[in-house]
Image (tube, rainbow, N blue to C red):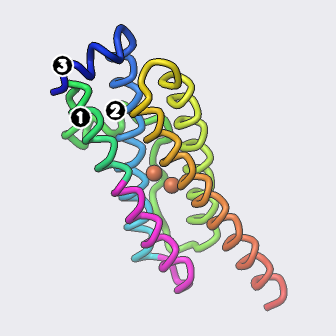
Amino acid sequence: MGKTTREIVGEKVDAIIEELNKTLADEWLAYMQYTLAASLVTAPQVEKELKEIAAEELEHAEELTARIVQLGGKPLVDPKQFYEKTNCGYEVPTEDNIKVLKDAISAEGCAIEAYDKVSKLTKDSDPVTYQLMLHILEEEEEHEEKFETLLEYLSRCQKTG
Ligand SMILES: [Fe+2]
Ligand SMILES: [Fe+2]
């Protein structure tokens, strides 16, 4: 629990921890949503993409947890809290490839907005969290684009097939 880190970050530290916990809830829910969806969908490309991206959401959860601890905060450890704190919610997965992809695109769009918000909150007060926000934001933007590309491809296949 970094005493000096807390001092450097200053008065915003508790507000930053609160926001990081909200995004932590989002990451766990996205990880669950994509992992469970991967075992239900019928298209192998969708399954593969969901699994790869779920692995990155799990990494994000680990990175956020580590930073919350460094800031002297308590990371969420009870799944009940995920629903209470989440910005982006949870869509129950189905076997419908198109719906799963649309739900994933919504989740990524929400995550991009959340990390953009926390990056602005930390920009001048907490450079280490700011760097982490930019790193995660970059990956969320990639996720959104990958899911969009796959949705376009599948939609085209359905029309022509
Ligand atoms: Fe993520
Ligand atoms: Fe993502």
- Kind of element beneath mark 2: helix
x 75%, y 72%: residue: 152
Q: Split into 4 quadrants, where in the image is the C terminus?
A: bottom right
Rendered image quadrant of residue 17: top left
The answer to whether residue 52 is magenta is yes
Residue type at the position of mark 1:
Pro
* Separation of residues labelled 2 and 3 (CA atoms): 19 Å
Residue at the (32%, 47%) spot, across then down: 63
The residue identified by callout 1 is 75
Question: Residue 91: image x %, image y %?
Answer: 49, 53
Report x, y in % for residue 29. 38, 50
Q: Is residue 35 magenta?
A: no
Query: Which mark is in front, 1 or 3?
Result: 3
Ligand 1 has an atom within 8 Å of the beta carbon of the residue at disc 2:
no
Report the disc number at residue 21.
2
Q: Is the Cβ of the residue at disc 2 closer than 8 Å to that at disc 1?
A: yes
**Residue in front for this viewpoint, 52 or 5:** 5
Task: Give the Cα separation between the discs numbered 2 and 1.
Answer: 6 Å
The residue type indicated by label 2 comes to Asn
Comparing labels 2 and 3, the label whose residue is closer to the camera: 3
Q: Give the mark nearer the N terminus: 2 vs 1.
A: 2
Q: Quadrant of residue 37?
A: bottom left
Q: Which residues are magenta?
A: 41-59
- Residue at the disc numbered 3: 3
Quadrant assignment for the N terminus: top left
